[in-house]
Image (cartoon, rainbow, N blue to C red):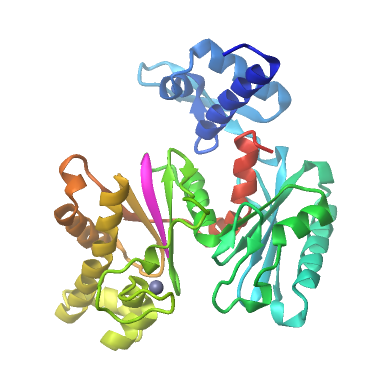
Amino acid sequence: MKNSPHNVRTIKNDNRALIFNYIRRRPVSRADISKRSNMSKSAVTMITNDLIKEGQIIEIGATASSHGRKSILLDIVANYRYAAGIALHRKYIYICITDLKSNILAYSNHKISQWNDPYKALDFAYEEILRFLDQLQIPMEKCLGIGVSAPGPLDYVTGKILNPPDFEFFHHVTVGDYLRKRSGLPVTVDNNAVLLTMQQYISDSSHNFKNYMFVVISDGIGSAIMTNGNIYRGFGGFAGELGHTSIHANGSRCSCGNTGCLEKYINLKNLQEKFGFSSYQKMVDDAYMGDKESISILEYIADEFSCALANMVNMFDLDGVIIYGQLSYRSEKLAKMLQERINSRSVITRTHPVYVYFSKMQPDEASASVCSAIINRYFEQKL
Ligand SMILES: [Zn+2]
């Protein structure tokens, strides 16, 4: 490959993106970046010194290295840039501004029922963003763009909402194009599960999974696969419909057209109807006290859920599964049951371990996830 100016710029951006990927997950030393990225120490020093001069990262003190020597840690400068977010929910719109570390600086919620035209709702959301930026005294050029979240299915490339159930108000609305034209800013549109997966990757660096599935359990079940920090999108960007994978060929019919879909079995509402408990928390507390019936309910959940998860482990050679949302209360017992079942069901676990744990992501981090795609694009040097 010739060293054309374009290639040199691309390599420089790739190296910067690689370095940002380490620093933004947790403060790290130059030596640590060099070791983990296979970049030379001199290259890491040169790039990080440039980023310090530009004001994008800072040195935040020292830590003892494995050799006993102190090494200086590098961290992101959170207020170097900002992102705006618009989360389109079924009943309300959430609007926010975050910094680069996903701290929410301003936010508001608004009922959708007050509008009769979806584009009027988007106009309001954009004007609210301008009001927030003004209040926070953030100049427009420091706003990276607008991240939008919505229930799927949606076309993340064009930013068009397709036909999510109970979301008719926004059906076929070209949210991405409309906001791009209105604001002149980059706009990303993604489904909630993808954005929560991106947020989890950044906000919880306690695991080092290379190829894991993040599962979001709410009324439905969404998921995404994260491979070395990148979301697996599939052909049209719709990958991750774990809730509509069948675990019973002759099971009950689902509105998606399939039979025996996972989300018909471990959805909290369906579990309450089937077993008659009113509080999931109380049922789990009883299981910890040794109540046999409650333990058998958790075993039922683990049996059904692990069936789908073992399929995913086998299909994608996962090294981890992280679960978020419903069923997270005192989750150690359920995580252990799931892990045992996946270990006995998946052929992959004979070659390497597959770990299951429940996400500790906090509610404000989850809310900030609406901006995570736009912030990711910035750190990937793609804005
Ligand atoms: Zn289904």
Place of residue 15 in the rendered image (x, y in percent of width and height, measured from the top left): 56, 23
- Asked if residue 142 is positioned above or below residue 90 in the image, the reply reads above
Q: In the picture, which quadrant includes the N terminus? A: top right
Q: Main secondary structure of the magenta part?
A: strand
- Asked if residue 162 is positioned above or below residue 83 in the image, the reply reads below
> From this viewpoint, is residue 163 visible?
yes
Place of residue 168 in the rendered image (x, y in percent of width and height, measured from the top left): 63, 78
Residue shown at the point (84%, 59%) measured from the top left: 131
Q: In the picture, which quadrant includes the C terminus? A: top right
- Asked if residue 43 is positioned above or below residue 216 in the image, the reply reads above
Quadrant of the image where one finds ligand 1 = bottom left
Residue shown at the point (65%, 72%) measured from the top left: 171
Q: How many marks?
A: 0
* Drawn side of residue 349 relative to residue 179, left or right: left
Of residues 70 and 205, which is closer to you in this image? 205
Residue range of the region highlighted in magenta in the rendering: 209-216
